[in-house]
Structure formats: C-alpha cells, structure tokens
Amino acid sequence: MAFAQFEPNYDENKVPKFIVPDPLTSFDGTQIKNTGDWSKIRRPELLAFFENEVYGKVPGNLDDISFKILEENTNALSGTAHIKQVEVTLKKDTESLSFTILMYLPKTTGKIPLFLGLNFYGNHTVTNDENVIVSSAWSMNNEGFGIKDNTATEKSRGVRINRWDISSIIASGMGLATIYYGEIDPDKNDFSDGLHSLFYEAGQEKPKADEWGSIAAWAFGLSRAMDYLVQDSSVGKVIVFGHSRLGKAALWAGAMDDRFAAVISNDSGCGGAALSKRRFGETVGRINESFPHWFCDNFNVYNNNEEALPVDQHQLLALIAPRPLYVASAQEDEWADPKGEFLSAHYTTSVYGLFGKKGIGTTEMPEVNMPIQNTVAYHIRTGIHDVTDYDWEQYIKWAKKFVE
Ligand code: GCU
C-alpha cells in the first residue's frame, strides 16, 4: 500500500480513539509500584520492545575504539572559547569508520557541562571558523548550501550557524559538541556503507528484520562520542540534543545509554516524541515508506496499524527517567504533531513520580512561548520546524538547574 497517497490528518476531531498504554502496567499485567520493579521488570521489557520492533538492535560489539585530537585552539570565537576537533575511529574485524567531534568549550576551569548533538550538513556548517574541517562524507545535495554530487565544499561553511547558538552556550558556561551524522551513517536507503556494514556476516547486505536502522546507528555514534567525552577531563555532564530525525536519534541514545545526564528532543515528531496512535501529521506508514532505512524492518508491522502497537512513544520517553527530559515543539510544525509531543511528555509523569521527580501533571497544553520546566520540560514556540535561539535560551536555562 502506498501511504504517501493518504492525506495526512490535521483535524483533532479525526484523531482515532485509543487507550494510552500504561507505563506502569507490564505486558503481563503486573502493576509497577516502585522504582525497583520499574528498573527490574518494566524498563527492560519496554527497552527490548523498542529495540526489537522499532529502532532495531546493534548486532555485535566493536573490536576497538580510538581517539585522536586533530586540532586544538584555545583562542577560538574571538578568544572566548576553546575548540577541539577529535577523530573517533571504530574498528570491527578488518573494517573501520571514523567521525569527527567538534567541541566548543568556554575558557573556564573545572568540568564543563555540554550539549552533544548531531548536525545535518557537516561540522563546518555550524561555524564560520576556517579551521573546522569540511567533511568528505556523503552529504545530502542542497543547492542553496553549495552541496552537489553529494559532496560538501567550502561554500557550505557557516550555513547552519542559525541553528546552533554557540555564543549563548559559551556565555552560559556550557559547551557544545557536534558531529556530522552522515559520517556515522549516510542518510539514504542503502546499507552498503556507514556503520551497518562493519557488522555484517559474510554475504550479508542489509540488517536483519530486528537489526538496526539508521536512527539506531546515529544513536550508537552518539554513545561512541560519549566514550570519548567521559574520558576528557575538561568535560562534565553531557546532555544529548537533537532536532527532528536527529531528535529521534537523541531520544533513542538517551534511552539506551544512561551516561547521558539529560535528553532534549527538538521537534522530533513521528518515531520520536510524538504519540504514534494519534495518527496526526506524519504516521508510522508514511515514515516507513518515505524513509525505509530509519527503523528496523519489524516496525513495518505497524504501518497503518498503530492500534496494534502495545507501546507508544511516551514509553520511549519514560525510559529516560529519572534523568531530565525536554520535549519541544513548534506551532507551525503540524507534521510533527505538537500536541502528540506534549501528551507524550505528560504521560511519562507517573514514571518520573516513582522517582520523586516532577513531570508534567496537566493534559492542557501550555500557551505558545510559555515553557514548563520541571524535570520533564516542554515548550511550544511560535514558528516553523527549526532550531532557534529561543529554543537554546530555554534549554540553557533549564540545564543550568541540574548541571552544576
Ligand atoms: C521529514 C520526516 C520527519 C523528520 C524530518 C527531519 O519531515 O518526515 O520525520 O523529523 O524530515 O528530520 O527534518
């Protein structure tokens, strides 16, 4: 069935009636009453479900990981910041893959808390700094950014500065680490390259039905960056952040790897923070048709069949508890279903409550530009699907409460 032929629903009255799966009732009906049962019974079974049926599991272990400082400058951003470019190399059998972490740190002493996030077009697009290496990995063509033949050039330096408010992050005493997602796995329906191919058995050409898609590969890359960050003596708590498809990856990374101190989902939508069962805007069928490589093949079972899902995305979010979680939406980003993102954050509240942490008690969405900032935080801002200085301002303010 071609889902693309279906008009997306943007009418609240046409949202199907459904029961929100209870985070505190296990698949066999056991009521989860305390953090011990959550950690021993419920969390593992939910994690396994998302691993086997949604994002796909990582099929093996690496043989080796190594780090190399490619560049370091203590006088970046007109002398206000310290910059580092670190190459991470992953090895498996005879294969290897490298990606580069770009780090901006304030010039303060002590352990610096930082945001870690993937970027869409290369590290050189988030800054005008000429020392930042132009990625040679496959890039999505973009005429406006001067990217053709899937190859980035000098022309795209700085084109995404607007999405990364580095100066405010630095001024707040926090840092930023970012990685070009295409160096981990090129975003195309082709499993011959990127991380997946490192793990193939002889003759294998694509992941098995319960094995990882690209979102899980990007999340795995974030965790390997974390392997570096935990042993860099200048780095403190790490908050994993992502926008849109990279917000989906940040959520999955945060669920899988509890070394991430907090998680931020910016406009992550379907397969991210938004509830799938609402079928508002993008649906499971649509996303699997347009991006067949993002999830594992098992997820296709739920195409146009969301009612069969024994879970929903609020339970992915709940896997992050008790760590701080921020879900953000944009008013004009109906495709990502802002209300579904909000409700999903709301429905984690019972799980955060087990830990004595404050979620979002109300089912009433806040007004635009009126953030709710508890351990679970949410805002909907005016404007389109994007990352803005307003978003960063909220993330920084919220993060400052728990990073020091
Ligand atoms: C598409 C896709 C979304 C995704 C977005 C993005 O719109 O349908 O699921 O979040 O791209 O990554 O920008």
Image: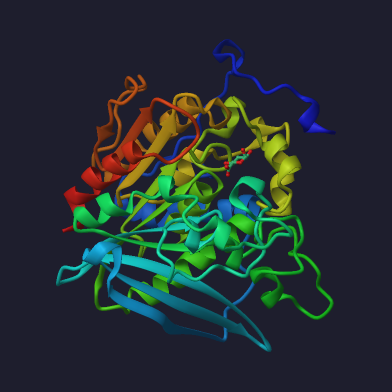
From this view, report whether residue 24 is shown above or below residue 133. above
Q: Quadrant of residue 347?
A: top left
The reply to whether residue 230 is in sight is yes
From this view, report whether residue 160 is shown above or below residue 108. above
Q: Is residue 367 left or right of residue 135?
A: left
- Of 315 and 118, nearer the camera is 118
The extreme bottom residue here reads 94
Q: Is residue 372 left or right of residue 297?
A: left
Ligand 1 occupies quarter? top right
Q: Position of residue 104 (x, y in %)?
A: 32, 65
- Of 130 and 125, nearer the camera is 130
Q: Position of residue 339 (x, y in %)?
A: 46, 25
Q: Is residue 169 left or right of residue 193?
A: left
Q: Is residue 370 left or right of residue 316?
A: left
Q: Quadrant of residue 265?
A: top left
The reply to whether residue 42 is in sight is no
Residue drawn at x 20%, y 54% is 171
Screen quadrant of the C terminus = bottom left
Residue drawn at x 28%, y 44% is 354
Screen quadrant of the N terminus = top right
Q: Quadrant of residue 198?
A: bottom right
The type of colouring in the image is rainbow
Q: Position of residue 72 (x, y in %)?
A: 34, 78
